[in-house]
């Protein structure tokens, strides 16, 4: 029985971290970001979104890239501003965080 527990316990811990990890990370980011700064980022996102209808070419792509960086910044803090229609999987929260880290130069706390 001890042997079974010694084998199963590490797997259970890894599974628990896999499932709860993104929520814990989002909570840490959210509590370390002021509400004023969060609101500023939301307004910046909305402004870019409104302006994109009048842009084209490189300016449109640059605006979309900046808006998506802000989207993942917000998502990493538990704010899903678009309420996406995509089907969510068990891996989705990790993929969102990885996208945020990739866009953020790999530093999770560089944009508090």
Image (cartoon, grey):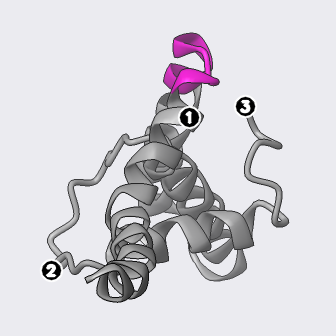
Q: Tell me which corner region of the image, top left, top right, bottom left or bottom right, holds residue 59.
A: bottom right
Mark 3 to mark 1 CA distance (whole Å): 11 Å
SS for tag 3? loop
Q: Nearer the viewer, mark 1 or mark 2?
A: 1
Mark 1 = which residue? Answer: 28
Q: Which mark is residue 112?
A: 3
Establish if 16 lies above or below 98: above
**Mark 3 and mark 1 residues within 8 Å of each other at the beta carbon:** no
Q: Residue at x 49, y 21 (%)?
A: 39
SS for tag 1? helix
Q: Which residues are magenta?
A: 31-39
**Mark 1 and mark 2 residues within 8 Å of each other at the beta carbon:** no
Q: Is residue 40 left or right of residue 89?
A: right
Q: Is residue 32 left or right of residue 50?
A: right
Mark 3 or mark 1: whose residue is earlier in sequence: 1
Q: In the image shown, does 58 or 77 lie closer to the viewer?
A: 77
Q: Is residue 37 magenta?
A: yes
Extreme residue in the front direction: 1
Mark 2 = which residue? Answer: 87
């Amino acid at each position: 029985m001890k042997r079974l527990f010694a084998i199963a316990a590490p797997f259970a811990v890894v599974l628990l971290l896999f499932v709860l990890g993104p929520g814990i990370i989002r909570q840490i980011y959210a509590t370390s970001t002021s509400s004023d700064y969060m609101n500023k980022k939301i307004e910046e996102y909305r402004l870019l979104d409104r302006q994109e209808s009048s842009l084209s070419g490189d300016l449109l792509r640059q605006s979309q890239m900046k808006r998506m960086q802000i989207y993942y910044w917000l998502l990493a803090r538990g704010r899903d501003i678009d309420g996406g229609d995509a089907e969510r999987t068990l891996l989705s929260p990790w993929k969102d965080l990885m996208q945020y880290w990739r866009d953020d130069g790999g530093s999770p706390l560089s944009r508090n």
